[in-house]
Image: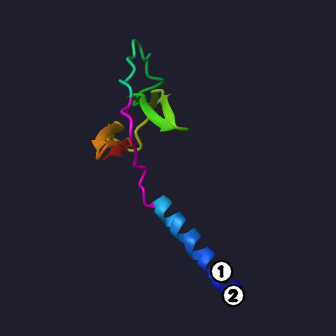
Amino acid sequence: MNRKLLLLLLVLVSVAAFSACASNGYYAVRTPPPPPRAYGFVGVAPGPGYVWVDGFWDWRGGGWNWAPGYWVRPPRPRAVWIAPVWRPYGRGYRFYPGRWRY
């Protein structure tokens, strides 16, 4: 009996771990995000080759939180930043995280 219970627990933990990994960073919420914040002045790049990455609204802790923009160096030459975006999905909105396109 204990072996079956242990095996069942192991299977449940494995399924939970794999389902969490399979999301690829996408998640959906019911309420639309607020309009993006406007930047009046982002400053000067800290050095040659830096790219400004705009901020975005992120869903954390049951509410919308602003993730501020920042300067970053691309991981490879000629890499292009694809900004994160919220798109309508079913009865809610789905988040597609930002990424580098090579």
Q: Residue at x 38, y 44 (%)?
A: 76
Element assignment for label 2 = loop
- The residue positioned farthest toward the right in the image shown: 2
Q: Give x and y (percent) for residue 82.
A: 32, 39
Classify 10 Å Cα crowding around label 2: few (below 14), some (14-19), many (20 and above). few
Tell me how far mark 1 sits from mark 2, CA to CA. Answer: 6 Å
- Asked whether the beta carbons under mark 1 and mark 2 sit within 8 Å of each other, the answer is yes
Q: Main secondary structure of the magenta part?
A: loop
Which residue is labeled 1 in the image? 5
Q: Give x and y (percent) for residue 81.
A: 34, 38
Q: Is residue 44 magenta?
A: no
| Vertical side of 38 occupied by 76: above or below | below
Residues in magenta, as a range: 22-33
| Vertical side of 96 occupied by 32: above or below | above
Q: Residue at x 50, y 30 (%)?
A: 65
Q: Give x and y (percent) for residue 43.
A: 44, 16
Which residue is labeled 2 in the image? 1
- Amino acid type indicated by mark 2: Met
